[in-house]
Amino acid sequence: MALEWRAEDVDSYRMDIRDPHRVLEPLEKEIRTVDAALGALRAAGILAGTDYDRRRFDTHRAAVAERFEIPWTAITPRMQRLLYAINAIRRPRAMLAAGVFCGNTFISNAGAAVGPGACYDARDCLGVEIKPDEAARAERNVRAIDPTGVARVVAADAVDIARGHAGPIDLLYLDADGDATTGKGIYLAILQACLDRLSPDALVLAHNSVNCAERLKHYLAFVREGGAMRASMNVVLDGEGLEVSVR
């Protein structure tokens, strides 16, 4: 089942990708917008609830701003909050994130389980980045947040890692790029490579569901209409969007 939730101001909500910590709106509005998205996901049966610890998220956000080297990012403040909240609500014991660049997208997910904003304990949070230099930077960034090693980043091909993952995977985050022909369409190959190791009620989060919708058309058709997912919702709270699917 395919669904959509859209913020009313999505066309005017924009960020400077090289200024990721800039405040774009009053905090109360950011919280209301994300809360509305979480409510829609709960109503669709994709999330079991909507509650997360906002003070712990604030601590997480401050630590990332202070300790992470982020050359640029398309993860808006709204998306950062949404990713953290989804993980804080679902509490995946094992999370796999494909295409983490400098680690900002990865820690937006894993930060609910590790570091100063953690609200639960995970077993394994694995980030994958195909470019060795970026993987090394991401690992340095993550180590500044999580000294335990529960969250870690490896330099590898996400399809290979997904295919070899022992499972179960409770949350799969997709933000990887394939070659010039495939682009974000690589999401489908990654998902299919580990589909049989997704746990019951596993979540699959696909970034760029709006601005890369054409490249993602086969992926979106698969999660919305292919029968592998119980429900899928396009959460449009910024210009990139996030497709949230439940097994």
Image: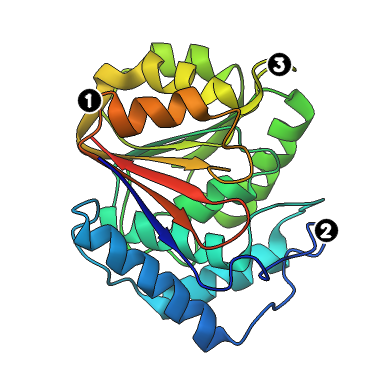
- Tell whether 164 sits left or right of 134: left
Q: Secondary structure at mark 3?
A: loop
First reached walking from the N terminus: tag 2 or tag 3: 2
Q: Earlier in the sequence, mark 1 or mark 3?
A: 3
| Residue 230 shown left or right of residue 8 in the figure | left
The answer to whether the residue labelled 1 contacts the one labelled 3, judged by CB atoms less than 8 Å apart, is: no
Which quadrant of the view contains residue 68?
Answer: bottom right
Name which residue type carries label 2. Answer: Arg
The answer to the question of whether label 2 and label 3 lie on touching residues, with beta carbons closer than 8 A, is no
Q: Residue at x 43, y 74 (%)?
A: 56
Q: Nearer the viewer, residue 136 or 101?
A: 101
Q: Is residue 30 above or below residue 70?
A: below
Of residues 119 and 130, the one drawn nearer to the viewer in this rendering? 130
Is there any visible trace of residue 123 in the rendered image? no
Q: Are marks 1 and 2 in contact (CB under 8 Å)?
A: no
The residue beneath circle 3 is 179
Q: Which residue was labeled with disc 1?
A: 227
Q: Callout 1: helix, strand or loop? A: loop
- Is 46 left, or right, of 212 in this rendering? left
What residue does disc 2 label? 18
Name the residue: 37% across, 74% down.
35
Left or right: 244, with 116 as reference point: left
> Is the residue marked by circle 3 packed among few (<14), some (14-19), or many (20+) residues within 10 Å?
few
Q: Residue at x 55, y 61 (%)?
A: 80
Q: How many angstroms separate mark 1 from mark 2 (CA)?
A: 39 Å
